[in-house]
Each structure stands twice: as structure tokens, then as C-alpha cells.
Image: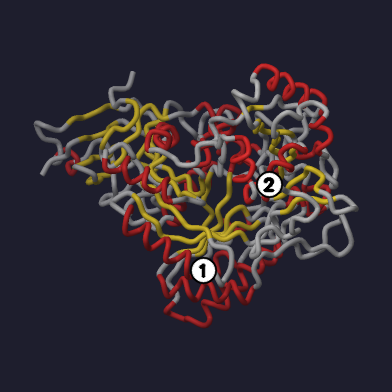
Amino acid sequence: MTADIVLMNARIDTVNDAQPWAEAVAIRGEEIIYVGRDSSDALDALVGPATETFDIGGRMVIPGMVDAHAHPDWVALSAWHVTLPWTYDIDEILAFVRQYAAEHPKEEVPFIYAEYYPSTLFDTEGPKKELIDAYVSDRPVLLQDHSDHCSWMNSTMLELMGVDKHTPVQVVPDDPAPQFVRDAEGNPTGWVKEMAWQYFADAMYEAIGWRPPDEVTPEMLRDFTSFLCSKGESALWDAIGNEATFAAAAALDEQEELNLYYHGSRRFFSLADLPQNIAVLRGWQEKYGGKHVHLDALKLFLDGTNEIGTSAVIEPFIVGEGDHGELRMSEDDLTACLLILNEEDLDLHVHLVGDRAFRTACNAVERARAELGEAWRIQVTLAHCELIDPADMPRVAELGIIVNWSTHWSGGYFSAQSLEWLGPERFDRMYQFNPIIQSGGVVCYSSDVITKYEAHRGDPFFGMQVAHTRIDPEFPIYPEHPVREPVSAKLSLTDLVKGYTLNGAIQLRLADRMGSIEVGKLANMAILNKDLFSVPDHQIRTVAPEAVLFEGRVVHGSLMLP
């Protein structure tokens, strides 16, 4: 049988160590049937009367990429949010909110949700509700901080939610992190951590007679998945999905409009609630699982964030006395969870940022693997891993753990406030992944974009530029010295391409089908407008696919290149 499509005169980065570079690739149906040189008897034999042959003009071709930690539904549902001006002037921020309120009366906009204000705008005591009250008090107002782990709201919002000094400090029984910060008398100050307000939002929505959209439609989801496809993505992993989102993904797949693998998870909070959440995930698998939609993992938050001192750290924070942060699950319970998940053949994806959380996760994996021996079969992915003790870095390879890093954070997107909690020595040790890669550990990459405001940063080439330069072109960590130190932590383009392709496919258990350009794998690939390895470092984000193939079909651009 002959090939349907042949691409020739190409510079193909195969991400296959046995054949790193090639000039031509032949495709039959969904699969690659030839990878090699332009001049080859084997290739000539595959070219028939119906074969379409395209001269790529020396352009670079890479495998289809993977966004291995994303929030497509959050991006879709945030379209109604208001964008704040980026400034460190509090009065300018609040004057903008007042002007917006004047131009949009509460009958039109009954709840103002605006993003973002800089995480370093306030000290560790946080902002106060009275500041917003002086500018807008006729309706609830919420301002989201840049870390997305804290909110600042006015008195009206607190009152409409029924939150006061009598509200329990721990608003979620199994999770100590969500909280309303209190003053000395126990009254809420207006600073809220880890989305605690969402547990009281229904009362506010009922009071104002309005609520935001809360379910993603196929059309809403398609906006983000089409964006990823246009950037050369062939798969994504939804970090905290819900039923409506997976139903939308399944509907797009049925309509042949998904054009990527959509893998997802179900969040759980404790050992006690793990069984019921497994049952929910099983139900979703039955209803929405298909060729391209897979629901195959559970998601756990093991700690919070370094920016507000809710991460779990080995040495105490420099703020406060003896505070080691918040570990949301003990090592014993996490080990027990791993044993249950292994029995259920479900993978685990763990949010963690502190070095104590990282060590706890490694210890739990080590204990579970030792108990199960050859019966161990699941994958454990640790997401973010912002601060890792050097002694624990070799454990990634030793234990078969996968590390997932959001590349566009590498320039210090919102890490500056961590300095107040961690101190300079630990601050400079953040975002270190080269030692893990050099020891043989698997590191894959993602966007973790959570709102329409930052959706454009989900472009993998934007992420590559930031990770390769340690400079954020939009939010430099310090304008006078924009490089996020140390420069030794810059990631190589070779490691970035492998992390976005083959290693991402490993996390999603798709490496036997995609992630490299090899005979027998799916024809998922992107033809680029520029050579990724030749473009100046500060222009990497201008690299873009001129054509994207998914399972042998052109889903973006055209093979008839200019």
C-alpha cells in the first residue's frame, strides 16, 4: 500500500534517540509509515498515483505537543471577569474599579470580579476591605491577586455571603487552607485565601439575583482547544475537571471537532473521601470516555502556595515563629491513597510547591512501591515542585515519578512575594529542574492557565522562551534585572521540546502512540514557520505552526505552504 501524504525537504526533529533527525515522513491514514531521507528506495516505493507530496522548503517539523496541566473550563468560564490595569499604585487600581462601577451600574453588573493586582502589593497581613469600601460599596466587589490563591473583597460581599466573626475559621472540614483572614477581634479583614469565598457564594448570588455561568458548553470549550491545536498541541490534561466539561469534550469529539486527546481527573481531599470520588470518576468514564477522551487520574492538593506562606516547607518560614506551612495530607494517608489507586488502576496527580510536600510525596511513593513490589503499576505526577531539597532531586528517577512544570512561570511570573516567606537562599533555589533531568528523571511541561486573562500564555512557544531565558517578557521579576536567577536553571531547547512532546505523552500514557515522529505512531506533528533552534532567544515566542496534523488530518493551516 502507498502513502496518502509525504512531506519532503523538511528538518524533522523526531524526538527519537534512535533517529534524531530526518528529512521526510510518509503518512497512511492516521499513522506514520516512513521516517528518513528524501532519497530512499523505501520512500519511493510508498509513493503512488494518489499520494500527495509536499515540499516543506526546509522548514522545521516537531511532534504534536502536550499541555500536561491545564484548566480549559476555568478559562472558558472566566470571560465575564474584568481586567485590572497592571500597576503597583493601589489608588489607581481602586479608581479603575470605581470608574468601571460608574460606567456599569449594578443592575447591569451586580458583582464586580476583577483580576489581577500584584501579589507583592501588600505585606503578609494582606489588604483590608475598607480600602475597597471607600471606592465601591453599592455591590459586591472581588479583586483577585496575581497568584490566584488570594482574593480581596469589600464589606458588601462579606455581608451578602453571611461571613462574619462567627463563621468557622476552617471553612472546609478536610482542608485547612481556604480561610477568611481575621483581625484581632476575629472579624474578617477582607483578605481571603484559597477561594474560601466560593463556599459561601450561593448566598450572595441568591441575594443579588444573579450568578455567573457555571457550566461549559462545547462551543465555549472549543475556543480553548482550538487555540491549543493552532499552537501544535495534540493532547491536554485537564487538572480539575467537572462533568459538564467532560461532556463538552465528548460532544466535540463526537462531532470530530476536538482534534486532540483530552485527559482529565477528579479532585479529592482526603483518604476518607477518596472512594466516593473514585466512584464519581468511574461514572464519568462510563458516560464520556472514548477514543480521545480519557478520565484516568485523581488530583490532590498536598499544600498551598509559596506566595502566601501556605506551602509545606522543611525549614520554617522567615515570617512568624516555627511555621512550616500547611501539609494537607499526612505521609501515612498519602501512602494509603496510593495503595487504593494502584488497586483501582488510576494515576495520581499532586499539586505541591514546598520542599516538605515534595519529600512527603516521594516518601509515600517509596513506601507504597516497597509494599507492592512488582504489583506497582500506576503513575504519580508531581505538579509545580517549585522548591525541592537537592537531596530529593535524584528520587524522581529512582521512584519513577513524573515532574510537571508550568514553563511560563520560569521568569518569576508571580514568585516575587515568595521571597518574604522563604528568604533569599531558598528563593534562589526555586524552579530548579536541570538536576532532575540530568539524573534521568522525566520532566514534562504545561501552561496551568486558569483564566481568559492569561490564556495567550498557554502558547507552548511562549513558555519555551520564558523557560529558556528566565525572563518574562510581560511581567519581568524586576524591571532593572529581568532575569530570574540563577541563570544555571535555564532549560535547554532540546529538553523543552522533549518535555512538551514525548515526556508529556508519557504522563498521559500516550507515548506508545505519540510524542515522537516514528514509524507506527500517530501522524501528530507541527510544521513551524521558523527554526526553533536558530531563532534568537528573545523571539522564540514568535515561532508558530504553519500547519498542524492530528492523526494524519490537517487541523490547522495548510500543507500548501507559501
Q: Amino acid at mark 1?
A: Leu
Of callouts 2 and 1, the N-terminal one: 2
291 on left or right of 472: left
On screen, residue 457 above or below 492: above
Q: Which residue is mark 1?
A: 274
Q: Secondary structure at mark 1?
A: helix
Q: At 51% across and 34% down in the image, what residue appears? A: 459
Q: Which residue is mark 2?
A: 149
Quadrant in which the N terminus is drawn: top left
Q: Secondary structure at mark 2?
A: loop
Q: At 24% across and 46% down in the image, what residue appears? A: 31
Q: Find residue 393 and report its horizontal and vertical position in percent.
A: 64, 63
**Based on the displayed image, in which of its 4 quarters is residue 49 positioned?**
top left
Q: Residues within 10 Å of mark 1 (few under 14, many from 20)?
A: some
Q: Find residue 196 and report its horizontal and vertical position in percent.
A: 68, 50
**Based on the displayed image, in which of its 4 quarters is residue 318 positioned?**
bottom right
Question: Is 346 or 96 nearer to us in this picture?
Answer: 96
**Based on the displayed image, in which of its 4 quarters is residue 232 positioned?**
top left
Question: Is 513 or 332 nearer to us in this picture?
Answer: 332
